[in-house]
Amino acid sequence: MSQINLDSKIPSGPIEDKWTNHKFDVKLVNPSNRRKFSIVVVGSGLAGASAAASLGEMGYHVQMLTYHDSPRRAHSIAAQGGINGAKNYRNDGDSVHRLFYDTIKGGDYRSREANVHRLAEVSVNIIDQCVAQGVPFAREYGGLLDNRSFGGAQVSRTFYARGQTGQQLLLGAYQALSHQIHLGNVELFHRTEMLDLVTHEGRAVGVVARNLITGAVQSFSGHAVVLATGGYGNVFYLSTNAMNSNASATWRAHRKGALFANPCFTQIHPTCIPAGDEFQSKLTLMSESLRNDGRIWVPTEFGDERSAASIPESERDYYLERRYPAFGNLVPRDVASRASKREVDSGRGVGPLKNGVYLDFAASIDRLGEETVKERYGNLFQMYERITGEDPYKTPMRIYPAVHYTMGGLWVDYNLMSNVPGLYVLGEANFSDHGANRLGASALMQGLSDGYFVLPATIGDYLAPQLGNSALGTDEPVFVEAQSQVQERVKSLLAIKGSRSVDWFHRELGKIVWDNCGMARSKEGLEKALVEIPTLRQEFYNDVNIMGHEETINQSLEKAGRVADFLEFGELMCRDALDREESCGGHFRVEHQTEEGEALRDDDQFAHVSAYEYTGDTAQPVLHTEKLEFESVAVAQRSYK
Amino acid sequence: MQVNLKIWRQSGPDSPGAFHNYEVPNASPDMSFLELMDVLNEDLQTKGEEPIAFDHDCREGICGSCAMMINGRAHGPETGTTTCQLHMRKFADGAHITVEPWRAGAFPVIRDLCVDRSAFDRIIESGGYITAPTGTAPDANLILVPKEVADSAMDAAACIGCGACVAACPNSAAQLFTAAKLSHLNLLPQGQPERYKRTVSMVNEMERWFGSCTNHGECSAACPKEISLDFIAMMNRDYVKAQFKQRRFASQT
Amino acid sequence: MTKTHQEISTANQKEGADAAESLAHYTGAPVPPPARTDGPWLIVFWRSDIAKKWLMALSGLALIGFVIAHMIGNLKLFIGKADINEYAEWLRTLGHPVLPDQVVLWIMRVGLLAAVVVHISAAASLTITNRKARPVRYQSRRDYAAANFASRTMRWTGIIVLLFIIYHLLDLTWGVGNSSWRSGEVYDNIITSFQRWPVAIFYIIANMALAFHIFHGFSSMFASLGWSNPRLSVLRKNGAIGIAAIILIGNVSMPLLVVTGVYP
């Protein structure tokens, strides 16, 4: 087991040439041979849909699995703010190198230089591709593309389509995918949830999935398997992820041998609507772009009970502008989130539950007029008003950080292939590009980069030598066995017939990880969580109650499988957080901070990727590390002052 | 607050369904309609009953999964709002609320409040795209799009594919859905080469599944993204034009 | 390589399903047959619902034009016997002396008949389509947000108007059921017909139905013909109300004033 070789396969040569040279060096599959290869793509978000569409266009035969009723519903659709592209259309000094630098710095020097540089290079092509597909990006009056600025950057490089950029980009990819479905290059299996990865002789050869309508367990076989199944933010129960987002696909792959990298890197988004009551099922994000024109403040007085309007200017603390004059309200997400937490923890929180800070648009409305503000953020304001019943044109919004994105994921090499040959991992599901913190408007960029440009170029390297081998039949013993294991698991979950609902366990798990592995983590808390999670898991297998049958839509059963996996994953996440004795990006260990309360990295000991191997016992994962080399940027303490 | 619910239950696509009555005594005005359903479902499970199946995902009003006919209106009484964004403060204490799945031949009920909306995917597959294979794109700023046009295209592209238009339409027509996608692509310069082919294919596919438009305007009134009926007019015009046009010379107009 | 819709439709995976799949109770929404796109283009055109609506709009526009012209002509009733009889004679001799008498009249009649046939057959065909599109109706009460009385009763007002046209032709063109009817004596025929209460009431009801029908039909026409220019929206809204009101007032005034004895 320990012979795992974490070869990142980073090409040699100057960083600017690595990707170009690599594309020449990889093996290719001749266009007429591509239809002989079958690829299973799981997940229909930006990464999955764009990969499936691009692979279909190239001529591969693709099977696309999604648990949604339509590929268009994947959670990429909810991304609001925008997508970065190093176009320098604003003439403000942007370049591929600057986007690369910003992303490395924003990630607190915990990502791979070569991957990030490739991401910055490809960002330019993504914008071109999306425009050609008909994505209705915002325009200037002259007909050219408009840009806005985003956290962590001093240039305007974010392209956007109102507050629905993710939706429009996903629809673009979904349309391209639909075209390939129409042509027969891609087969779509909707409401089909992957429940296990199938490996044969160490290679990924397919997946086992459950048809969510009929409960039928089916196998899907291919020469390669692509996971684009998103992140694990829902381990926290309350997050901005969609209700169905889960980590089961990646966790099941991990159990079959894929290494899980940097699970403790989670991003807490600073601008979400604070929880209103105990019934809250999820948190809603307000786009980071709001920080362009909104000013964040709290009352200087502790426990101030006055309404926002009656607090005079002199008694307001615009703490981000005060502490970070250079970036002000546009500091990166982790910095902004921790600053809010500090204010709320100190007792200056606002709102009925004292669990938020103000995001105030009064100054912008004065300066720009209500019309302009409405044009920029109208739909966000409307959404806020719907949820809270308050009018943000009149009273400031209340915001608080919430779990939003997870930088960790399955370990992949430069080709996006995991350590299991034939298993590719794209988008949020992999760990590759964002280090310890993701910059705003970069998730969409990474998903599309992986799907449109990287995977189609690199997958040939693995497939080409397999020419002539047909995909394993789904009646082969490995599939039959995997299928019966999945059926067994489903049956055993249904057979527990305990007394508590699946949601109850999910909420309990969420509380444990949020309290101990959330915005601030301590040795003591993490050790406590590592005791509590296995106990909760034990209880789950004794006492969970799932009503209904397996041969029909059974949403509790679906959820039970996901929560069961979160109960294992949560433990790994806390274990990684405990192991990483430093603070970096979204990972903040209270033991490691500067006197001013900023994150304190330990580059000597922790400038590496922590990749965990599953050993059959969740308490005993084996840690492998991949050293991060920085050749093109100077590693420095991040400063946004 | 307390609410009385009358909810359609149906165990499978071919099973007969019926309304069941439920009471939620401990609803909060700040909860969303789906959170009310969560509370009810949790209660049902503790009583040993099967929870009510309903589609939902993002709960931010953008994925288009949630779909309920609430008191005879698609997505309930609030205009421009999906079910997940409908909050209980819009109902009176002690309100009686009837919840039914979308009804249309193309949207069969598969369980309780879940319907199969794959017919929408079939419409998009038939032509709802611009053929631009990855890697063939010119620089983004080479294609000029007047701001007004980009805005209109965005208005149309805002469609979330929830199916409320079909559910609300007395004829089960999918004109607003189809027109929204057609207008999004047909308005943009990038969409011109395939404009008429796309229009004919998508309309043909739509008409296989759905009813026809009699201009009631129910679709637009029910649409959570308030997509305008004008797009339907645009689709009608493009369709008829496509039938009369010498398409080999289409670039001349 | 290109597969047909049915083969790739995930909603129809019944055929060739593997063992696990055959457990399935559900095989997807019933996939309707593909749209037929073969044959002469006029027939292909007619198969489309959108084209039918377009033809309904055009025929409806022609019929509105007829209704208005017909009303203006008939209002001569109030000027006097000689005027309206002269108008009727003019209609019969329209085209004189280039064409023989009644040729233009018959061309118009054939045109009108064609418009009526197109209008009604499209409506009937679309009604069937729409019924089929929702085989299981809503089991709870609908609460309409935009559909109004006029739009929801088009089918019924249409049928009333059709029945009325048939009666109207029998009554005043062919003189069936009116013993005092005399060919060419338009004025007397109208007055004697309208002096009967049941006939007058039927005329009034039918014209109210016609007004509602035209109110929705006129504004609906803009969408069906694809006129979405915002500059037209004023015409669309006010035009629908105006035309419906004019037709209602003009047409109802004749039976109403005659039956109540106000005129002549």
Image (cartoon, rainbow, N blue to C red):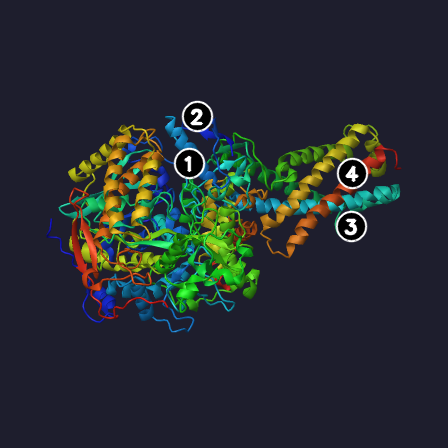
Q: Is residue B215 left or right of residue A573?
A: right
Foreground label between 1 and 2 = 1
**Residue at x-position 34% and y-position 28%:** A548
Mark 4: amino acid: Val
Q: Position of residue C105 (x, y in %)?
A: 73, 45
Q: In this figure, which residue is indicated by the disc labeled 1?
A: B38
Q: Nearer the viewer, residue A113 or B120?
A: A113
Location of residue C71 with respect to B14 vertically, above or below: below
Foreground label between 4 and 2 = 2
Mark 1 — on which chain does it sit? B
Mark 3 — on which chain does it sit? C
Q: Is residue A91 left or right of residue A568?
A: right
**Residue at x-position 16% and y-position 54%:** A624
State the SS at label 2: loop
Q: Is residue A459 left or right of residue C145?
A: left
Q: In this figure, which residue is indicated by the disc labeled 2?
A: B16
Q: Which mark is residue A121?
A: none
State the SS at label 4: helix
Is disc 4 in the same subunit as disc 1? no
Q: Position of residue A640 (x, y in %)?
A: 36, 67
